[in-house]
Image: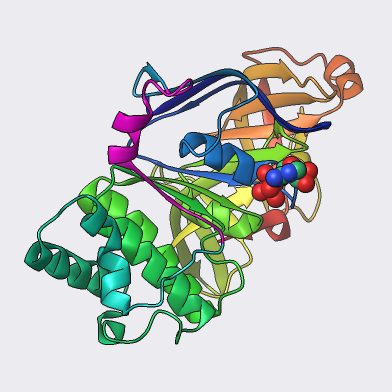
Amino acid sequence: MLFELQNVSKCYGETVALDIDSLQIEPASIVGFTGPNGAGKSTLLQIFAGLMAPTSGTVTFDGKPMYPNGGLEAMRKRVTYLAQNPVLFQMSVRRNVAYGLKLRGTPRTERRRAAEEALDTVGLLHLAHRGGHQLSAGERQRIALARAICLRPDVLILDEPTANVDREHVRVVENLIPSLLRDRGVSTILASHDERQIVRLSDRILALQSGRLVPPPFENVFEGEIQERDGAFFFVSPTAMEIEVVAHRTGKAKVAIRANEIILSAAPLKSSVRNSFRGKIASIDELPEGGVHVTVDVGLPLVAEITHHSLCEMSLAVGNEIFASFKSTGVLVF
Ligand code: ADP
């Protein structure tokens, strides 16, 4: 496990910014936190990054407690944190990028080479000689990312890596994060208020609200391919399940279906709903905030949210055969 949190809270005076019972972050993955402003995302990321001790609870990195201080030193060699509004120094871009290596005592030629490689990775090698203060917001974000990559971390922690930057920079950063995992094994933990970005990038989606972990906004997120047939678009999963969707392109995609958009019925629905699948109920989970999650195995595990009243009325039980239906307009394509 990379990080493990147990009973962690963080208070600023009277404000409880974070209150997490238990959380584990696995290696070799992209984990995305979403939630509105003030949800506690930055606070949590700063605790992961070793910048701030929690008010209570335990945080471990690679099995070693980080606070008080024990595991911090070892963690900092492997984890690099990028703040929401990174500051660049009044020196050339290349020296900015190499700065962390300089602090680590890396010889000059080696850090020059590493800085240029990192700048190339973020597509900004041509700015190597530019002053750190002569840059757009997007360029600053990407150069700060190059500075982080340059340290060759095992884990990158990114706080709102594309806030206030234009589409071109968003595209570069969003392509870079999965490629760092694929090519160099770099795990990323990121926070963004942009739910769609979190879905696009993350292997695991977590949501925070008022400092607490809450069910993520999209329960049914699947990866596959969009195909077109006779003017209609279909999402095809690796298990060959087909879902009709509204799309304007083909190729690799993620789709998400909100759990409350899925209708459960004992018989097939006679309606305009384009997607209806027969499956077996795999699990039934009562939600702490009310409501029930019914997972139906239809070739993919589809989670439907229903009321407790519906659960009783339909006498649903694990193992029952049931139909799960939803509109193609209810499927979000990313
Ligand atoms: P997010 O990153 O999701 O926007 P934050 O972690 O920044 O959320 O903030 C969580 C809560 O803690 C908010 O209510 C915020 O106002 C409060 N907070 C954050 N930093 C401080 C601070 N340094 N002093 C006082 N309150 C803070």
Q: Is residue 56 left or right of residue 83?
A: right
**Visible in this render: residue 218?**
no
Where in the image, quadrant-wise, is ligand 1 located? Answer: top right
- Assign the N terminus to one quadrant of the image: top left
Is 330 inside the magenta-drawn segment?
A: no
**Visible in this render: residue 187?**
yes
Q: Which residues are magenta?
A: 66-84
Q: Is residue 233 left or right of residue 145?
A: right
Q: Is residue 290 left or right of residue 295?
A: right
Above or below for 240 versus 287 = below
Image coordinates for residue 182, horizontal then vertical, percent = 26, 51
Nearest the camera: 313 or 116?
A: 116
The residue lying at 28 percent from left, 39 percent from top is 77
- Give residue 28's quadrant in the image: top left
Above or below for 292 versus 191 = above
Image coordinates for residue 114, horizontal then vertical, percent = 17, 64
Image coordinates for residue 334, horizontal then vertical, percent = 55, 61
Nearest the camera: 47 or 232?
A: 47
Nearest the camera: 84 or 296?
A: 84
The residue lying at 80 percent from left, 46 percent from top is 270
Image coordinates for residue 186, horizontal then vertical, percent = 30, 46
Q: How is the image coloured?
A: rainbow
Q: Is residue 26 left or right of residue 249?
A: left
Is 68 inside the magenta-drawn segment?
A: yes
